Image (cartoon, rainbow, N blue to C red):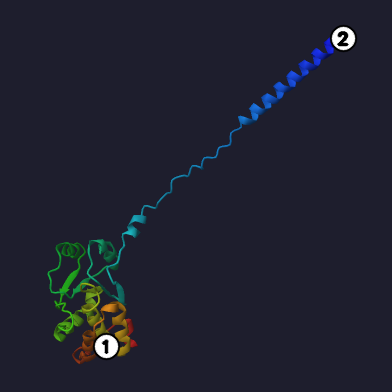
Amino acid sequence: MKDDNTATANLTQNRQHQVCRTTGAVSSVDQVVDMSPPVMSPEVVPSNAGDELNLIPSLNFAMVDNGIFRSGFPDSANFSFLQTLRLRSIIYLCPEPYPEANNEFLKANGIRLFQFGIEGYKEPFVNIPQDTIREALKAVLDVRNHPVLIHCKRGKHRTGCLVGCLRKLQRWCLSSVFDEYQRFAAAKARVSDQRFMELFDTSSLKHLPMSFSCSKK
């Protein structure tokens, strides 16, 4: 009788032990690890970031000297950038009428337009009138027109010739004048343009005042 009681007690203990092991296993499964990516807080963009992204310079834009800039033909995408220059005038070197949108921009910002129409012929038919360049230079040299932007279509040939003649007035050597011209014209550089700059007579303009930073070089 004693042996039966002992066997019954051992069986009960084994069943309790198994129940405890099963309960432990279930408990360990319930501890699920969260593997999902963390939730990122939204990025706060400054309110003026869009304004900075809208400042797009015109094609071939560069500073020539204090108060003088050059570029290709500006369009509406460049207007916000041009406003930062606080221009007083634009010197336009093409014969075609100025677009209406550009004229509206000039009126809204109090910018004066000087047009010196030079035909954009290709070599060997290039004809750059010295008188036209000379009159355009007078407008460039007049500090009352500064800040001023000089532009043609691409900012390469007609603009390059006008800036090159300005450099001669500033007593730049011809190699430096040609280097600057070629930097903007690149593969489109024309021998006729460089010949024009070399032969351009600046004597009738030397009496005009120049207050540029490069004029003392």
What secondary structure is marked by label 1?
A: helix
Q: Position of residue 105 (x, y in %)?
A: 19, 63
Farthest-out residue, right: 2
The residue that label 1 is drawn on is: 168
Q: Please indicate whether residue 217 sits to the left or right of residue 209 in the image.
A: right
What secondary structure is marked by label 2?
A: helix
Q: Position of residue 103 (x, y in %)?
A: 16, 65
Give the quadrant of the C terminus: bottom left
Q: Quadrant of residue 86?
A: bottom left
Q: Quadrant of residue 162?
A: bottom left
Q: Please name the amino acid that badge 2 sits on.
A: Lys
- The dot on residue 2 is 2
Residue under the point 23% across and 78% down: 159
Q: Please name the amino acid that badge 1 sits on.
A: Lys
Farthest-out residue, top: 1
| Residue 65 in view of the camera | no
Q: Please indicate whether residue 197 sits to the left or right of residue 116 in the image.
A: right
Residue under the point 14% across and 63% down: 100
Callouts 2 and 1 close, C-beta under 8 Å? no
Q: CA distance from mark 2 to mark 1?
A: 127 Å
Q: Position of residue 30 (x, y in %)?
A: 60, 29
Q: Nearer the viewer, mark 2 or mark 1?
A: 2
Q: Position of residue 16 (x, y in %)?
A: 74, 19
Q: Residues within 10 Å of mark 1 (few under 14, many from 20)?
A: some
Count of all numbered marks drawn on residues in the image: 2
